[in-house]
């Protein structure tokens, strides 16, 4: 398996996830690879050839966040990896945890985000000084397969409803196509309730009635933004895991970025990375172990004894990780 510690808080939270996997009794032979700023420093490129070789061989990775500069520098390596390995489905399960202070209760939703196209296709050009075009690409093929993934996921996880989120009142052709494909796929799953909502209204409903959502099906950009909003509902970015699935592989990573403001201080919340690693174990067939990690993490949060700073506590990344490992050893 490829292990990408990443930039910023990445090495800290990934070390926590690796320690928890080891403690649950799953032995994984990691092929440790650098990417992003860490790789650039060492090899002069943010995507070294050996990283791509490793991913081509393993097809599965646990990954920390990678730095991408704003309005300059290299294009996002995350986007590059998702597109290169056709990891078209980004899944971000977001749930409330007892013990985590937040005004919202009973959030239990899953963001299903199309991961390969939309405005993230990176087709941008200056057509005249002061005039820039950025092209939004939506295809029927990608829209159908992400909708299919969402419905299959809903069936497999006994989820009851899917809301497609869009702005087809303005982007009638592109978001209109996305919806047309989602509706066609929905007809094959009559047992799952399918609804649609315009993205701005959906954001308002997310913060007034988040419990009314189950699975959210979104294009790439809306999915990216709404994921962070959803993380805010349950206590912050330190808590929400994620996976990027394709037909032939997957990369597991937290929703959060490199968190440069807290990097290197042993204070980052490793929950998101640890829960991402539990998703990886599920994918590898170690569901029992994945479940054990989830249960121990939920229990540590509920006990409020080792909360990290982002959740109002004083525990360090390693205190929190040790508490999970200790909890699993007693289970
Ligand atoms: P960010 O997610 O790194 O940080 C936003 C806020 O959340 C910060 O206050 C940070 O301290 C907090 N936070 C994030 N993770 C946390 C954790 N585990 N525990 C406690 N607090 C946490 O987003 P930002 O600042 O917009 O991006 C920083 C860098 O990360 C940028 O270069 C960006 O491109 C990159 N990024 C990479 C991603 C990836 O590799 N998948 C995803 C998102 C951003």
Image (spheres, rainbow, N blue to C red):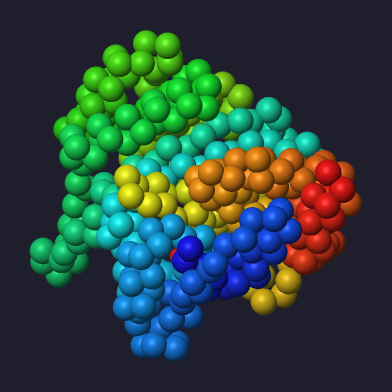
Identify the residue at image location x=74%, y=41%.
295
Left or right side of 321 for 174:
left
Q: Foreground: 321 or 305?
A: 321
Left or right side of 71 for 322:
right
Left or right side of 305 for 252:
left
| Quarter where residue 22 is shown | bottom right
* Visible residue check, residue 171: no
Where residue 158 sits in the image (x, y, percent)?
A: 53, 22
Q: Is residue 197 above or below residue 14?
A: above
Where residue 312 sits in the image (x, y, percent)?
A: 80, 54
Identify the residue at image location x=57%, y=62%.
28
Count of marks placed on residues: 0
* Visible residue check, residue 187: yes
Where residue 150 sits in the image (x, y, percent)?
A: 39, 31
Ligand 1 found in image quarter: bottom right
Residue most extreme to the left: 127
Identify the residue at image location x=36%, y=16%.
189
Q: Is residue 260 above or below residue 116?
A: below
Q: In this view, does 309 lie above or below 8?
A: above
Residue most extreme to the top: 190
Where residue 3 sits in the image (x, y, percent)?
A: 51, 67
Left or right side of 229 for 288:
right
Q: Tell me the quadrant of the picture where the C terminus can be found.
A: top right
| Quarter where residue 181 is shown | top left
């Amino acid at each position: 398996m490829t292990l990408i510690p990443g930039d910023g808080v990445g090495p800290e939270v990934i070390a926590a996830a690796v320690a928890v996997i080891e403690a649950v009794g799953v032995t994984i032979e990691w092929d440790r690879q650098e990417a992003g700023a860490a790789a650039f420093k060492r090899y002069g490129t943010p995507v070294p050839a050996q990283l791509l070789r490793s991913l081509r061989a393993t097809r599965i990775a646990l990954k920390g966040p990678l730095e991408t500069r704003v309005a300059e520098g290299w294009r996002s390596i995350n986007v590059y990896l998702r597109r290169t390995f056709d990891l078209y489905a980004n899944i971000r399960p977001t749930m409330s945890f007892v013990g985590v202070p937040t005004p919202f209760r009973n959030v239990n939703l899953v963001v299903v985000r199309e991961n390969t196209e939309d405005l993230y296709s990176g087709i941008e050009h200056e057509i005249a000084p002061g005039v820039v075009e950025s092209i939004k690409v939506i295809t029927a093929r990608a829209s159908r397969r992400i909708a299919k993934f969402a419905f299959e996921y809903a069936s497999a996880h006994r989820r009851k409803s899917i809301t497609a989120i869009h702005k087809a009142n303005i982007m009638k052709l592109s978001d209109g196509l996305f919806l047309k494909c989602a509706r066609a796929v929905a007809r094959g799953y009559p047992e799952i309730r399918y609804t649609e909502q315009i993205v701005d209204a959906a954001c308002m409903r997310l913060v007034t009635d988040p419990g009314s959502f189950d699975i959210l099906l979104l294009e790439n950009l809306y999915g990216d933004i709404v994921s962070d909003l959803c993380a805010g509902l349950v206590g912050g970015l330190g808590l929400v895991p994620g996976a990027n699935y394709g037909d032939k592989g997957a990369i597991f990573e937290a929703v959060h970025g490199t968190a440069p403001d807290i990097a290197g201080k042993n204070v980052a919340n490793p929950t998101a990375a640890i829960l991402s690693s539990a998703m990886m174990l599920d994918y590898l067939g170690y569901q029992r172990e994945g479940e054990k990690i989830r249960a121990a993490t939920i229990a540590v949060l509920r006990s409020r004894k080792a909360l990290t700073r982002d959740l109002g506590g004083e525990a360090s990344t390693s205190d929190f990780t040790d508490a999970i490992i200790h909890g699993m050893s007693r289970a």
